[in-house]
Amino acid sequence: MKKLIFVSLLALVCLLAIGCQPQSGSPAVSPTNPILTQQSPLDVPTKTPVIEGLPEGYDPSSEEESDIVLPDSDFSDSGIAVFAGATPIPLDPVDMPTPTPRQPLAFTYATYTAAKLGLTFECVAGYVVDDSQSDIYILSEPAEQQKDNYSVQFTVALSPTTASYAIGNVRTDVRAFANDLGKMNYKEWRISETAERNLMGKPGYYVTYRGVMHDDTIVRGRVHMALLDNKRLLTIHFTGPGEYNSDYTNVFYRIRETIKAI
């Protein structure tokens, strides 16, 4: 009897032990891992590339004076344009002399007569004349006066127009002329916005430009066109070394204010 009771108790203990074991089909419970949230990095502002030369939307009329003064007093000693009633504005700091400002160039003026064009005007004395073409008159700086590996040149031209040619065409053509200049020999080329200004008392438009040649020579210039009596288109163009732009813009003013028919 005792053996029977002992065996029964032993069997009961085994059953209890089996019931306490985890079932093979039950999923194992694992600790929950915290979710790590990665914060997006802040956008680091990038520096906008600086394009040397004319800024976007540059208004060339900012170079203009309210009243022209023909004597050589339009520029300060630093070469910055000084205009009556306006704040002195350097055309482009890149083109200004540094670190020591140079004195502005001093010019002696003379009267030139473009007989084939029927025009006369004042420009720097001693320039080389090319009037071999009937519709173009070119003045070039002598080679010995060249600066920064680039010679100054002033061109005056007259071309006939059609009956339908109007002032709106002048605005288009002055930009096209300037754009065409930059298609050869330049690795950088920019032109200003178009500005309106009379020439010989007739309506016209002009633009300024800045180019960098493949040898890094900086070139500046201006193209001004005006419609004369709805029959002819007058074009005055000058080009010169960038650092001397203010000086030769002054010469351009002299031509513009003295040009007249003969």
Image (spheres, helix red, strand yellow):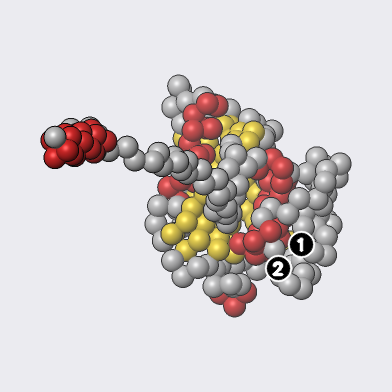
**Above or below: residue 138 compared with residue 40:** below
Instruction: Rate crowding at label 2 as few (under 14), some (14 to 19) or many (20 or more) other CA atoms within 10 Å.
Output: some
Q: Amino acid at mark 2?
A: Pro
Kind of residue at disc 1:
Gly
The residue located at (46%, 31%) in the rendering is 161
According to the picture, the residue beneath numbered tag 2 turns out to be 97
Q: What residue appears at the point 60 percent right and 47 percent down from the top-left corner?
A: 55
258 in relation to 199, above or below: below
* Label 2 element class: loop
Residue 88 seen from this side: yes
The residue at the far bottom in this view is 144
Q: Are marks 1 and 2 in contact (CB under 8 Å)?
A: yes
Counting residues from the start of the chain, the first of labels 1 and 2 encountered is 1
* Residue 222 visible from this viewpoint: no
Please identify, in this view, whether the residue under mark 1 or under mark 2 is nearer the observer.
Answer: 2
Q: Locate the N terminus by quadrant.
A: top left
Residue 124 placement (x, y as % from top left): 69, 62
In the image, farthest residue toward the top:
164
Measured as percent of width and height from the top left, residue 65 is found at 78, 44
> From mark 1 to mark 2, how far is it between C-alphas?
8 Å
Quarter of the image where the C terminus is located: top right
Q: Which mark is residue 79?
A: 1
